[in-house]
Structures are given as C-alpha cells and as structure tokens.
Image (tube, grey):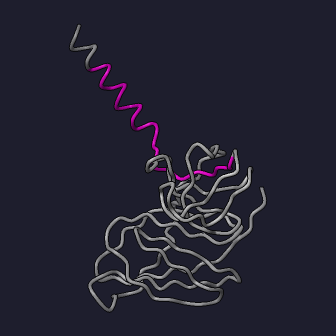
Amino acid sequence: MTRILLITILTFILYNSNAQDDSSPFLAKTIKKTSLKSGPDSSSKVKLILPVGTQLYVFSNNDQDGFIKVIDIKTNKLGYVRITSIKKIKDIPLSQSNSFEENGQSSGSEPEVVIKNRTSKTISLIVGSRYFSLPPHTTSTESIESGDLLYTASAPLVIPLSGRHYFKEGDKYSWTFIITTSYH
C-alpha cells in the first residue's frame, strides 16, 4: 500500500512539474505604474516609467529576486520589472518555423549570423546571451555561441517572436527580419 501511494505521489509531482513550464514567454500588462529597470534589482538605473496598462513581452515567469526580464512592446526597450506589477494576458508559443538559414562556413570556429533588417524600424535580436540592435535597412554579421539556443526578435510596436535553434560550431546562418501584419 505504501509503495503504491509513493508511486502515485511521484507520478503526480512529475506530471505537474512538466505541465507548468515557467520558462515560456507570455504577453502581460502592467497593473500599476512601474519602472523598467536596467537590471534585476531595486538599485538598477530606471530606463522608463511604465503607466498602467503597458503591454510587455515577458521572457519567462522565472524571477530574479522578484524581477522578471521583459520587452516594452511600444518602445522595444529591454529591461526588468517587478513581477508583482504585471498581469499575464496570454501565452506566446515558441515559433515552430526555422527562422535561421544555413549559409556555409563561418570565418572562425564560432557560428556566425548575418542579420538583415529589411524594415523601417530599428530591430533587436537576442540569440542565447548575445544582444544585437540594427538600424533600418542594414545588415550585420555577428558571432554567437554554439548549441541549442533561445532567440527573440523584436521591434517597436511589434509582438516579439521567440524560438529555439541549434547552432553548430563553424557554421554560418542568416536571419532576414521582416514585419508581416495579420488580421484575425
């Protein structure tokens, strides 16, 4: 009896820990006036004051000392807000399409990404721990780390796109940033 109870409890714990993935991005809004900070602590520099109702892209529900990493959708500014100052609106699933195209060999051992901004907005691309910002209608070649990495692409007034991609050592990739509008 004790063995069956233990197996049932372990099964319940495993099921519930897999059912709630706190690392998935979501759309949120501020529920009170709050500060967008440069770091995950109270003493970090304030980048913006966000009014009530500001829409935010939240990277995950995982907090650092009560702060979570976000992008202000209106301005495309990256920063941190207190987790208690937001309300989740909806989940944003990771992209299933492959946004990166393989383009031969990189000039070194690290993977390289050729980022092409074909929009009239300044765009941001985060790949793993690297952050890139490109002005309108420009191209830049950047080195990144290898491995299975999360990426997020964003621009002002656009809901960011996130996904995963495996980057092989010594390979070159390209990413062309365009903005498409869809009506539901």
Of residues 51 and 23, the one drawn nearer to the viewer in this rendering: 51
Residue 45 % position (x, y): 54, 65
Of residues 108 and 55, the one drawn nearer to the viewer in this rendering: 55
* Residue found 56% across the figure and 61% down from its top: 37
Outermost residue, top direction?
1
Residues in magenta? 7-30
Residue 169 % position (x, y): 28, 78
Quarter of the rendering occupied by the N terminus: top left
Residue 156, placed above or below residue 52: below
Residue 84 % position (x, y): 58, 42
Quarter of the rendering occupied by the C terminus: bottom right
In this rendering, position of residue 3 left or right of residue 20: left
* Residue found 53% across the figure and 60% down from its top: 95
Outermost residue, right direction?
183
Outermost residue, front direction?
43
Residue 26, placed above or below residue 141: above
Residue 152, placed above or below residue 56: below
* Image quadrant where residue 112 sits: bottom left
Q: Is residue 14 magenta?
A: yes
Of residues 103 and 79, the one drawn nearer to the viewer in this rendering: 79
* Residue found 29% across the figure and 83% down from its top: 170
* Residue found 64% across the figure and 43% down from its top: 87
In this rendering, position of residue 116 left or right of residue 178: left
- Across the whole image, how many numbered discs are drawn on residues? 0
In this rendering, position of residue 110 left or right of residue 35: left
Residue 111 % position (x, y): 34, 80
Residue 63, placed above or below residue 38: above
Q: Is residue 170 magenta?
A: no
